[in-house]
């Protein structure tokens, strides 16, 4: 695989650590690497107008209900510790063993847990703008759009190891070593502080990402014609 990657014109990476992992696992030389991270969302600035103290939701989790995102583990830990949370995320049509178990935990949580299921993108952003902290328990992410969007909406973001959000948003994202208990403990602490995260100074946008990708394609095309 490393040899195959060395033969292509470019390898587009979302994060530096992604490239390092590929190098380690395959022997790829990384001479053709191009960094093209995800952009920040474009939305009405009124979404993030609320001060964190006036936001009605505390801890929010966003993502499809699936094993990789570990909502079942988070929900169990939250119920055991009396932590109130809101989840947004669709489940397979007809459910799955995992999503059915998640639904059972929510139903038995006596109001601690709320599951809003599938929502429009605009509604998700608005909910982020009314939440204080986002928790992302995924065991692996490359560059999570959810983390970027939540931070852009004025949430503190607390993530498990395995992602790269701290590479781009070090002041807004906290990465927690350990298991779900440690992750939820750090999240509840972040919520209790009731202080707004610093504004994001990185202006990297989807337009920037498109322009860099297009420039890379043009270089390939010119090289093939010459």
Image: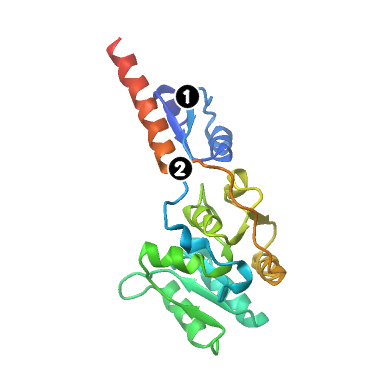
Q: Are marks 1 and 2 in contact (CB under 8 Å)?
A: no
Alpha-carbon neighbours of circle 2 within 10 Å: few (<14), some, or many (≥20)?
some
x and y percent of residue 154 in the render?
A: 57, 60
- Between 75 and 171, the residue placed more toward the observer is 171
- Between 63 and 93, the residue placed more toward the observer is 63
For label 1, the crowd category at 10 Å Cα-Cα, with few meaning under 14, some 14 to 19 and many 20 or more, is some
Residue at disc 2, secondary structure: loop
Q: Is residue 143 left or right of residue 184?
A: left
Camera-side residue: 121 or 187?
121
Percent across and percent down for residue 82 are: 65, 83
Q: What percent of the width, then of the height, locates residue 204?
A: 50, 40
Q: Which quarter of the figure has residue 207?
A: top left
Rendered view: 153 above or below 118: above
**Relative to residue 123, is residue 144 depicted above or below?**
above
What secondary structure is found at the residue carrying circle 1?
loop
- The Cα atoms of the two marked residues, 1 and 2, are separated by 23 Å
Tell me which residue sits at (53%, 63%) in the image: 49
Foreground disc of the pair 1, 2: 2
- Where does the N terminus fall, quadrant-wise? top left
- 199 shown above or below 20: below
Q: Residue at x 57, y 72 (%)?
A: 55
Residue at the image position 38 percent from the left and 73 percent from the top = 96
Residue at (42%, 58%) from the top-left corner? Answer: 44
The residue where tag 2 is placed is 205
Could you tell me which quadrant the C terminus lies in? Answer: top left
Which of the two discs, 1 and 2, labels the residue nearer the N terminus?
1
Q: Which residue is mark 1?
A: 32
Farthest residue to the bottom: give it.
Answer: 110
How many callouts does the rendering have?
A: 2
Q: Is residue 178 left or right of residue 72?
A: right
Give whichever of 186, 70 is nearer the camera. Answer: 186
């Amino acid at each position: 695989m490393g040899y195959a990657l060395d033969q292509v014109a470019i390898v587009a990476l979302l994060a530096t650590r992604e490239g390092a992992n590929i190098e380690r696992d395959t022997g790829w030389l990384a001479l053709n690497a191009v960094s093209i991270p995800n952009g920040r969302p474009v939305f009405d600035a009124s979404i993030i107008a609320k001060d964190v103290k006036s936001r009605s939701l505390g801890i929010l989790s966003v993502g499809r209900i699936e094993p990789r995102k570990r909502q079942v583990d988070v929900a169990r830990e939250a119920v055991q510790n009396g932590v109130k949370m809101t989840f947004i995320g669709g489940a397979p049509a007809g459910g799955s063993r995992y999503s059915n178990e998640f639904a059972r935990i929510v139903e038995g949580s006596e109001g601690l847990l709320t599951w809003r299921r599938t929502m429009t993108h605009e509604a998700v952003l608005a909910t982020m703008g009314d939440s204080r902290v986002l928790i992302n328990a995924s065991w692996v992410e490359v560059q999570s759009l959810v983390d970027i969007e939540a931070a852009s909406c004025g949430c503190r973001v607390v993530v498990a190891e395995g992602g790269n959000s701290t590479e781009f948003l070090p002041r807004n994202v906290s990465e927690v070593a350990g298991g779900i208990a440690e992750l939820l403990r750090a999240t509840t602490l972040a919520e209790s502080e009731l202080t707004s995260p610093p504004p994001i100074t990185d202006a990297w946008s989807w337009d920037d990402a498109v322009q860099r990708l297009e420039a890379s394609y043009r270089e390939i095309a010119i090289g093939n014609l010459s």
